[in-house]
């Protein structure tokens, strides 16, 4: 996993005719070709079931491709197994809608989980994290403004704070790519903006390639540089965020926009 | 519900009750169940009860060290068995185990342990290491593994697998997943199951004493076979007291955990 092997000319992520057919026969991805340049913040929009989650999960191999390939910094996900797959995943941080923190463990330990690929297993099992890794975890917490909460149990935090710990965990991986799967779907409007701002700041400050799945179109337009629209597992829109209009959204969604498609629509409720 | 439906349900219920009655009668006949016998020997029973009272209070000081031994057997069996049960349960749990084959093998091992009664293990170890407390402790170790691993692997199968996925997504291997996503989720149940096994073990180690595995059960058996019924009464009362007190403590601890 030396950095020398990585060619900086490779795009951060390249989908090469990537397809996923689930055992039920449902097509998750249908021959997607897509190239994400390094340092971009891309928001993926689409109805639920359009394949947004499948697209993100095929990047770190949580969902297995049934056709084509995905290259992360030039390395094939499909051909990576065992240690190679773990090394690839270590370069890709993931943020989940439901935070996925281990509630009984401390905030710091949860962030240290971003170091599992870099620390020997015996040290993890005994809880003997190297000082350098603890420092990386604390810095990641600092970035999301929660360093002073490092010692408390994760269950003591609010939903928004838990999501920011989730971001810190991804950052602790020192990743090249961050994937965020509907990171604000269970948060109120104000917290949603806070989380999106954190993601945007991290993308800018650390030039980490960031892919975010969102349902809310106004959030997508506000924070993305580029918007990719998915419908039935295929890319139906791809363009700069400031050029996307209502007609494009209608094409992606297959219907006109409703109050439920914008965040403030929820906020006014 | 329609009238026809209700009638059919009554009919099914009636058939079930009849079948149950027939089965009971058949089984009672098989075991030679004879209420007359019991009534005819009521006098003998009354004599034994008469001989049992009052309890021989003076005998109490001879119970202390056997009781201690019984508790020691239970503690050793529970702790050793508890420690062995954790890896077994994790390797057996579907979705947690590294592979379906490994899971299957360990589930069969658990089944085998569970099919054999604790008395069988006591006899087996007694013939291996000789009659005494050590054999009892080994038997209860196996018994504890059987009980705790079964319950625990079921808990492990119903954890939130979102967390294991999160650890894997960060590049974690199987060990990291177990350490941070599985064990923290089953820890409260684990401690609770071991305490539960300890409660059973205190009672079981008494029974094991009857077959020569040391402790209070052995004293009970000696006194019974020499017709010292007043001492037997004292022992039974003491066992009752100890078991109830330990159960209360253990239950209180378990309630606080889950």
Image (tube, rainbow, N blue to C red):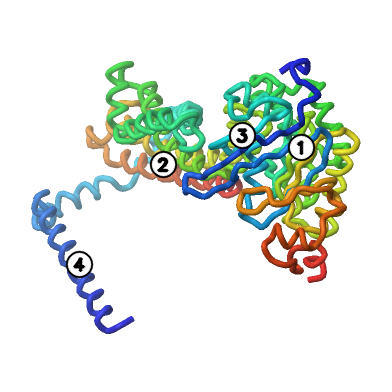
Compute the Cα span from label 4 to label 1.
Answer: 71 Å
User: Helix or strand or loop: what does disc 2 sit on?
Assistant: helix
| Residue receiving disc 3 | A61
Give the Cα separation between the discs numbered 3 and 1: 17 Å
Pinpoint residue B223: horizontal percent, then vertical percent.
28, 33
Q: Nearer the viewer, residue B122 or B1?
A: B1
Q: Chain of mark 4?
A: B
Badge 4 marks a residue whose secondary structure is helix
Residue nearer the viewer, A10 or B21 = A10
Callout 4 and callout 2 share a chain? yes
Residue A29 is left or right of residue B60, and the answer is right
Question: Which chain is disc 3 placed on?
Answer: A
Name the image quarter holding the N terminus of chain B.
bottom left
Residue at which label 4 appears = B17
Q: Residue visible at 72% across and 22% down?
A: A118
Up the image or down, A139 lies above or below B241; here it is above
What residue is disc 1 on? A36
> Which numbered disc, 4 or 1, marks the residue closer to the eye?
1
């Amino acid at each position: 996993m030396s950095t020398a092997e990585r060619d900086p000319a490779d795009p951060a992520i390249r989908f090469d005719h990537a397809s996923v057919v689930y055992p039920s026969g449902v097509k998750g991805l249908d021959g997607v070709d897509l190239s994400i340049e390094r340092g971009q913040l891309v928001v993926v929009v689409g109805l639920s079931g359009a394949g947004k989650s499948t697209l993100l999960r095929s990047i770190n191999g949580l969902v297995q491709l049934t056709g084509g390939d995905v290259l992360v910094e030039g390395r094939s996900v499909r051909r990576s197994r065992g240690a190679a797959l773990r090394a690839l995943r270590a370069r890709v941080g993931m943020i989940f809608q439901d935070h996925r923190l281990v509630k009984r463990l401390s905030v710091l330990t949860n962030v240290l989980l971003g170091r599992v690929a870099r620390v020997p297993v015996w040290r993890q099992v005994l809880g003997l994290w190297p000082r350098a890794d603890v420092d990386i975890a604390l810095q990641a917490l600092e970035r999301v403004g929660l360093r002073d909460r490092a010692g408390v149990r994760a269950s003591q935090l609010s939903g928004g704070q838990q999501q920011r710990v989730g971001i810190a965990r991804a950052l602790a991986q020192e990743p090249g790519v961050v994937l965020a799967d509907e990171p604000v779907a269970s948060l109120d409007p104000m917290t949603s903006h806070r989380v999106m701002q954190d993601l945007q700041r991290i993308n800018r400050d650390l030039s980490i390639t960031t892919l975010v799945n969102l349902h809310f179109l106004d959030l997508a337009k506000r924070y993305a540089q580029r918007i990719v629209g998915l419908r039935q597992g295929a890319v139906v829109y791809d363009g700069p965020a400031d050029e996307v209009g209502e007609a494009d959204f209608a094409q992606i969604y297959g219907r006109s926009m409703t109050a439920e498609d914008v965040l403030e629509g929820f906020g006014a409720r | 519900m329609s009238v026809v439906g209700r009638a059919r349900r009554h009919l099914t219920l009636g058939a079930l009750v009849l079948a149950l009655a027939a089965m009971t009668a058949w089984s009672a006949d098989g075991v030679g169940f004879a209420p007359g016998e019991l009534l005819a020997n009521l006098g003998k029973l009354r004599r034994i009860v008469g001989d049992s009272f009052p309890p021989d209070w003076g005998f109490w000081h001879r119970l202390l060290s056997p009781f201690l031994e019984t508790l020691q057997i239970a503690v050793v069996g529970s702790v050793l068995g508890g420690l062995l049960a954790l890896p077994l349960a994790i390797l057996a749990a579907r979705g947690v185990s590294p592979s379906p084959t490994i899971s299957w093998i360990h589930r069969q091992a658990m089944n085998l342990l569970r099919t054999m009664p604790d008395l069988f293990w006591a006899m087996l170890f007694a013939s291996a290491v000789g009659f005494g407390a050590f054999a009892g402790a080994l038997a209860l170790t196996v018994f504890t593994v059987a009980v705790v691993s079964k319950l625990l692997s079921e808990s492990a199968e119903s954890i939130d697998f979102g967390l294991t996925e999160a650890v894997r997504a960060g590049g974690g291997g199987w060990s990291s997943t177990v350490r941070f996503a599985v064990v923290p989720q089953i820890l409260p149940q684990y401690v609770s199951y071991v305490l539960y096994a300890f409660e059973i073990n205190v009672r079981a180690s008494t029974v094991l004493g009857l077959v020569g595995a040391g402790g209070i059960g052995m004293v009970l058996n000696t006194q019974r076979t020499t017709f010292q019924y007043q001492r037997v009464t004292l022992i039974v009362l003491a066992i009752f007291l100890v078991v109830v007190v330990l159960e209360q403590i253990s239950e209180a601890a378990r309630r606080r955990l889950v």
